[in-house]
Amino acid sequence: MKLNSIIPKVHNTFILFAAISILIFSSSIAQAENWGVATIQSTHSYGSTIPIASGTIGYLQKNGKTSKKYIADDTRNTRVSSVLNNLKNNDVLIINTHSNAMQFGAGSSGVEWADFYNYWGTRKPPPKLGLVIIHGCIFSRDSQGNDILATDRQIQDIRKSLNADAIISFNSKVNPLVGRISLHQLIVGILKGHKIASLIHGRNLRFLVDSQIDRDNVTLADLTTQQQFLSDPGGGNLRESILIVLDASGSMSSQGRIEKARDAARRVLQGITAGGDTEVGLITFSGCGHVKVAAEFTTDPQKIIAILPQIRPSGGTPLATATAVGKKYLREKSRGAKKRFILLTDGKESCNG
């Protein structure tokens, strides 16, 4: 059963459903401008160049919409400042450095990396970068003999100074795929959860790729006839998020209102396939200032169906507060590309909202 067959889509209006008013709206954010790619690539200390930042980067997705396809420029022979001067809002910045660059040692890569760090001392980066990828290869090892990323204070400072949708750092030294692969293939490996990478920060960023990684054998498969969505752990890898905000105030106890609200919520939940691409959460409110997350977002609607009989009406109706809390929760905690807010209430504010 589809949700559309249960409740009609309306925006910013109340509709009568038995004795209950239901408010439904879809939440969306304006699409970002087209994304470009700026690349800083340096040469390895012993002379070989790992072509990690050259070639096709693929399609970047922002809020469910695909931007243009861009090519990452190989700029290992270009001064860092000339690349940074051309950065614009929502651009992708790839900082591709190797051993001595991470350690700020001698050699061209060390000079380039230091130049990048010093650049921010006199100039401000764009207000918003789309994706920042910091790539470093060093020869340090932990107690188990595994290669580890540098933790230099200056590198951490750079991470803190960049305002980006996602910041990814990784070490190609421990990546069995490094050799002749394109950047978008490597990103697939990062976003599929391999230990070669560390996701420093992620928001609603998606990457549409034309290749994928076999998680067991760590091999690449060509998907020229099929495309697949991958998302960072910060969000955006589900089709839809639905938040049900249910009025459990004292006024809902009369005329069977709470039963009708439970029934309306149950019908919405029964239209969602367990384990599918839709997640749902539940917030209840009863008593002024008492708004509760009864169930966090889940792809198993049965978990919330089991909670519904336990909801008992009492107290005042903090309608305005519950609506504000619900919108904030939906905006910050959901992972769906499309967001839907369903308010089940008798519509009577009683808490001076």
Image: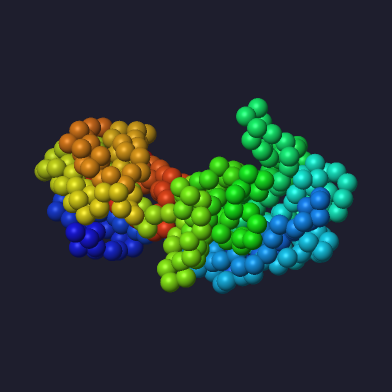
Quadrant where the image shows the C terminus: top left
How many marks on residues?
Answer: 0
The residue positioned farthest toward the top in the image shown: 143
The image quarter in which residue 254 lies: top left
- Residue 101 lies, in percent from the top left, at 79, 47
- Say left or right for 228 vs 202: left
- Residue 195 lies, in percent from the top left, at 55, 42
Name the residue rendered at 65%, 27% in the picture. 143
Vertical arrangement, residue 203 with respect to residue 79, above or below: above
Between 260 and 6, the one nearer to me in the picture: 6
Q: How is the image coloured?
A: rainbow
Name the residue rendered at 56%, 72% in the picture. 68
- Any part of residue 125 in sight: yes
Vertical arrangement, residue 254 with respect to residue 51, above or below: above
Quadrant where the image shows the N terminus: bottom left
- Any part of residue 120 in sight: no
Name the residue rendered at 77%, 45% in the picture. 99
- Residue 274 lies, in percent from the top left, at 26, 49
- Residue 124 lies, in percent from the top left, at 76, 54
Between 64 and 30, the one nearer to me in the picture: 64
Between 31 and 322, the one nearer to me in the picture: 31
- Say left or right for 87 vs 17: right
The residue positioned farthest toward the right in the image shown: 106
The image quarter in which residue 291 lies: top left
Between 329 and 271, the one nearer to me in the picture: 271
- Say left or right for 5 vs 9: left
Vertical arrangement, residue 293 with respect to residue 189, above or below: above
Name the residue rendered at 76%, 64% in the picture. 75
